[in-house]
Image (tube, coloured by chain):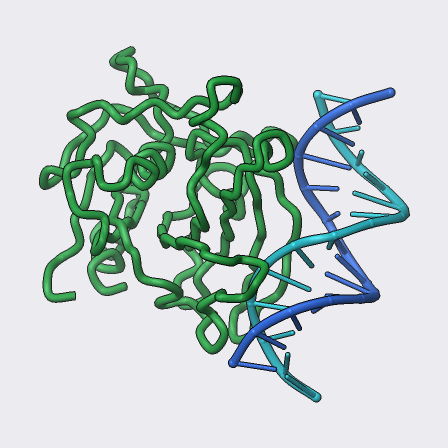
Chain colours: A green, B blue, C cyan
Amino acid sequence: MDEAPKSLILKGWKLAFSSDSMRGSGASSQGDLTSSRLEVAERRVIRVAVPEIGNPELPPDDGHTWRKYGQKRILNSIFPRGYYRCTHQKSYQCPAKKTVQRLDVDPSILEVTYINHHICHLSSTAPSLAPPPPPHLLPSGGVVVNHLLTSAASNSGKMWLPLSTETGEGDAEYGVVHMADTMFNSGGAAGTSNSFMDLLIFQANAKDDSSVIRHGINL
DNA sequence: AGGATTTGACCCTC
DNA sequence: GAGGGTCAAATCCT
């Protein structure tokens, strides 16, 4: 980690990628998930600032639909970890999973761990399509996108939606982590080697923005 | 009625 | 034995 994490700045969110496993969270001792259940799990960690609006426990929309299959309290962690798998796991054998957990050291941040890639959107019959991110969203040192995300308050609609579409641009349809996930799934097509990327997503409109940024650097 | 979520139990690895 | 991950029945919601 001899270089600062690549970062994106979306209006309302900052992103930084990480390929590290289980850093900064309570999970550590058995965190490398090499169990037979997870097989050759490829893991990527994303940290997301919890929304000020809506349910802070809800993970951001990443362009895919997830089904929660478990939740568990983790040792040394105040907050439980939620376990999600792709809705299309059955239909398309999609191996993608993710876990969502709030950091006990900073409850304002959710740590989302993606496990395996989606294959459902690779299928021509798959209903969930993940289009590539717009070129100007690529991590070229920091970009600004004109939209915010907020969590739908609906009990069932656990999806983060663009809040501000003031420009009416097409990319307002992109969820922040949707973009991140797309970049992950594109295998570094984002223009940067995905080996040492760090993704942090922070809510830039938080009043304590500077401290949020500091978190992004230090974590 | 069908699908998603919740939650406790079970399984596996260390 | 401890801890994390998954299963599956019950429940809730649309």
Q: Residue at x 36, y 68 (%)?
A: A24
Kindly give the residue lying farthest to the top in the view shown: A168
Residue, x 49% and y 34% (percent of image)? Answer: A151
Depicted A88 relative to depicted A113: above or below: above
Residue C2 place in picture, x, y as percent: 63, 83
A105 vs A157, left or right, is left
Front in this rendered view, residue A87 or A110: A87
State whether residue A80 appears in this view: no
Residue A130: image quadrant is: top left
Position in image of residue A194 (x %, y %):
23, 48
What is the total number of numbered labels drawn onto the structure image?
0
Quarter of image, res A211: bottom left
Residue A112's x, y, as percent?
A: 43, 51
Q: Residue at x 32, y 38 (%)?
A: A180
Check the image and report above or below for A151 versus A110: above
Q: Which quarter of the figure is the N terminus of chain A placed in?
A: bottom left
Residue for point 31% across, 45% down: A201
* Residue A219 rendering spot, x and y as whole percentages: 27, 63
Q: Is residue A4 above or below residue A57?
A: below
Compared across the picture, whether A87 is left or right of A42 comes to right
Residue A183 appears anywhere in the view: yes
